[in-house]
Amino acid sequence: MSILQQICKPANRPIVATFLGDSGMGKTSLAATFPNPVFLRAEDGLQAIPEASRPDALPVIGTADEVFLQIKALIEEDHSYKTLVIDSVTALERLFIQSVIDSDPKKPRSINQALGGYGAGLGAVASMHQRVRKGCGILNDKGMHIVFIAHAETETIELPDSDPYTRYNLRLGKKSVAPYVDDSDIVGFIKLQTFTTGDGERKKAISNGDRILVAYAAASCVSKNRFGIKSDLPVILGVNPLSGIVPSL
């Protein structure tokens, strides 16, 4: 069969999603609404979910090597899980940084001095994130949804054709962000729905506790999707906001 004879319409596949937000925004609870999930935990955030509805989880990891061993087990061993949730890639960053520092025989004091400096240490950390993304890509090809959870931080964007502004991004080294943004089907920012009261310099932001998911391109945060989402989605406890929008969910 020739290459051109293999042309066809790609079928729907499980999604790769990244959710970021401040602490306490419900990132873990949202991830738990995906089909039959199992959590790979670099931090233990499942205590926020009631025990009766708490999803299964692998043992909390303490080293970088354990990350790859757990992903390898999911790839090679039989199981019925439909979603892998990594909670969180921000915590993975800390493990990877420590791993790179510990591997340097010169015993550097920081990641900036590791492997001779000049960004080599941070580059090694980014390569470990790429390795995580590659392993998760294999699981995605095998039929699993992949959900990455990340904590958020603000950064200043300086563009040549506009004034500087601030936006939310993943709390990761600059080189480590791409695997979880560029190669994801959805990048969603979870935030409180806020309202402004007052006038002049006495304005005050208030909220009733409702949360929304921003999953479309926005200047205020790193976000995107491949499913035509153009407006905020309500985040309701126990309900997947992407259900009915993403064909594979």
Image (tube, helix red, strand yellow):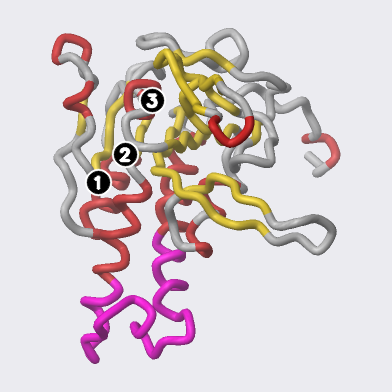
The dot on residue 42 is 1
Relative to 62, residue 189 above or below: above
Q: Quadrant of residue 225?
A: top right
Query: Position of 96 compared to 148: left or right?
Result: left
* N-term mark: 1 or 3: 3
SS class, disc 2 = strand
The quadrant in which the N terminus is found is top right
The reply, left or right, for residue 135 in relation to residue 224 is left
Circles 2 and 3, Cβ within 8 Å, touching? The answer is yes
Stretch of the chain drawn in magenta: 100-128
Q: Residue at x 68, y 30 (%)?
A: 226
Query: Which residue is rendered at x = 61% and y = 28% of the image?
Result: 215
Q: Which residue is drawn at 42% across and 48% down?
A: 135
User: Are dots 2 and 1 in contact, CB under 8 Å?
Assistant: yes
Q: Is 111 contained in the magenta span?
A: yes
Residue indicated by mark 2: 87
